[in-house]
Amino acid sequence: MNTSARTPLLALALLALAFAAGCESAPVRHPKQTQEFVLTPGQPAPDAELGIECAVRVVLPGPQPGSGLAWEIASNNAKVLEQMGEPAHAKGGGASTSVSFYSLKPGRSALKFVLVRPGQAEAEPAAICELTVHVRD
């Protein structure tokens, strides 16, 4: 292979190595215990008490397919709770969405979820759910 043909291949290989070295994947979390809370808009939820390296799974009602609505996380103390993925449709009967959080250190996180049309600026939420999580040693 001549030098002019090798140069682009070498440049591509170096670019691929640099890209791979710069990409960090999220750590895989294995909670010691997971607590589940099913929330209902407009109804107060009991506070969640977690230990460190545990998880809380929040289940939210809806949205109905085709409604154009989606649950978004409006509030979370990311120093205390790490989100373990995007909100996703929960398995089982009926329309519901679930999202999990992993406890990193002692503290408090006020989770707030809003049901909105994604991308719509300053929209009034169709529903709001809240859960306060206390992480203890």
Image (tube, rainbow, N blue to C red):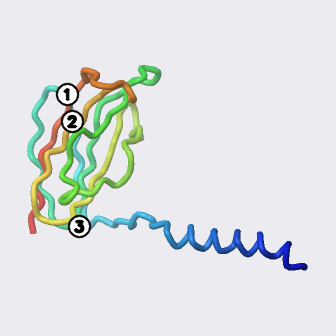
Q: Residues within 10 Å of mark 1 (few under 14, many from 20)?
A: some
In this rendered view, identify the residue nearer to me: 63 or 108. Answer: 108
Q: Disc 3 marks which amino acid? A: Glu
Which residue: 27% across, 40% down? Answer: 73
Picture coordinates of residue 137, whole percent (x, y): 9, 69
In the depicted structure, whether residue 74 falls above or below residue 24: above
Residue 41 disc label: 1
Spatial CA distance of label 2 from label 1 is: 7 Å
Identify the residue shown where x is 70% and y is 69%: 12
**Looking at the image, residue 69 lies above or below residue 5:** above
Q: Which residue is label 3 attached to? A: 53
Residue 26 sits in quarter: bottom left
Q: What residue type is disc 1 on?
A: Pro
Indicate the position of residue 136 as horizontal and vertical percent values.
9, 64
Tell whether label 1 touches label 2 (CB within 8 Å): yes
Task: Tell me whether circle 1 and circle 3 mark residues in contact (CB < 8 Å).
Answer: no
Q: Calculate the distance from the C-alpha at mark 1 to the C-alpha at mark 3.
A: 28 Å
